[in-house]
Image: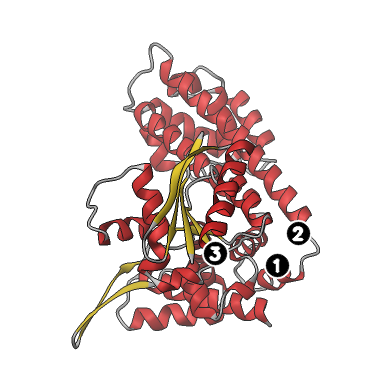
Amino acid sequence: MLSVGIDAALNAHQGEIQSEDGKVHWHGRFENNKDGLDKLVAKLEEVKKNTGDTVIGIYAEAMGSYFAPFQYQLTQRGYRVVLVNPRKVKKARDMKNLGKHKSDPIDASTLASLPWMDAKFRDMVTHQRYPISELTRLHQKMKKMETQVKNSLHSDLARVFPEFIHNVKYRDSKTVLKLLEKYPTPAKILEVSEGKLIKQVKKTSCGILGPEFVKKIQSLAKDTIGVPDEEGVIGYRIKFFIERLWEIKKSINKIENDVKQRTKDNKDIQMIDDMRGIERFKAISMYAETGPIEQFKNARKLQGYGGNTPIRIQSGKKEWIGRPSKIVNQHLRYIVSVCARSLASHSEEFREIYYREKMKGKTDTQAYIIIGNRLLYHIFTILKN
């Protein structure tokens, strides 16, 4: 049997071909283009012919998109390509007593030796997710970017107008952001007449907010202890962050609408969405990250792939349960954790689980982890049956 290890990079990859006895038949560098692909395949065919062995797998680290074209092309040519979690590669490197020594040839060699070090790698397959996950992951990235911009905005407001942060609800609402975009500092707010402010607030809030809200803002601005923005720098930053927020929000809405349109006829997503407490886009995200349900033998495998499963350490008659494993699909874990909190509030079944675990002395986080794993059990059952 032959095994191939590839350490991927942007411009070129490092590869090594090993046999079961650890003998190295070839190692070298090849470009990340068609010539490099042809060079690798030619070497593989040459070694196969000389040894009479078959290639049981091509192993590469699951790092970014650098290896994606090679993965596709090699798969199309009939090779089994396995993406390995970098933590498992590090563990294998430690087992080979390489310590902190790391280089492209060492990583390629370590990857090629994985099926000889642990037999389970011989049958291991890469978990597949649906293509729509590229858009749901983009949405997740944009939401994180939105949070970062909001934090920067709140930080600047805390410098020039701390009373606003403490006393104004819904400070990220359209009405408040429009007001701050035009009048970003207390001094700017006090320069404008009360009537003009009331007119703007009524228009942006569709009449919900009015004179009382404006008087409160003006009163806070008058008695503020904030740092005076004499150079207008903080006001400029506040306007910049708000403009950036509008752009991000617009992009998020566009992604959501496009994804929902693409999946409007998907019955599996509809069944997940029917669960009380799960919003449509979250249902799409979980479905996309889970991928074909046939790749999971049972619900526990899915929980291990996307849930908070603890690391178990056992020695003799003693057993310890440690922190949750990090060798998971982090995107699926994030979506599940968000949905767990929503289910605890809106679903009677999951609310009972939450209070049951709290009665046992569990923390909120521990209760939500249990709810998240139960959610994955339900998703497995729904998609499997």
Tag 1's secondary structure? helix
User: Is the residue under label 3 in contact with that under label 2 (CB below 8 Å)?
Assistant: no
The span from disc 2 to disc 1 (Cα, nearest Å) is: 8 Å
Q: Which of the two labelled residues, at mark 2 and mark 3, occupies the earlier sequence position? A: 3
Residue bearing the label numbered 1: 269
Q: Which of the two labelled residues, at mark 1 and mark 3, occupies the earlier sequence position? A: 3
**What residue type is disc 1 on?**
Ile
Residue occupying image coordinates x 38% and y 43%: 104
Instruction: Mark 1 vs mark 3: give the one in front.
Output: 3
**What residue type is disc 3 on?**
Gly
**Where's residue 27, x and y in %?**
43, 46
Residue occupying image coordinates x 66% and y 71%: 272
Q: Residues within 10 Å of mark 3 (few under 14, many from 20)?
A: few
Residue found at the far front of this picture: 50
Residue bearing the label numbered 3: 52
Q: What is the number of the mark on residue 382?
A: none
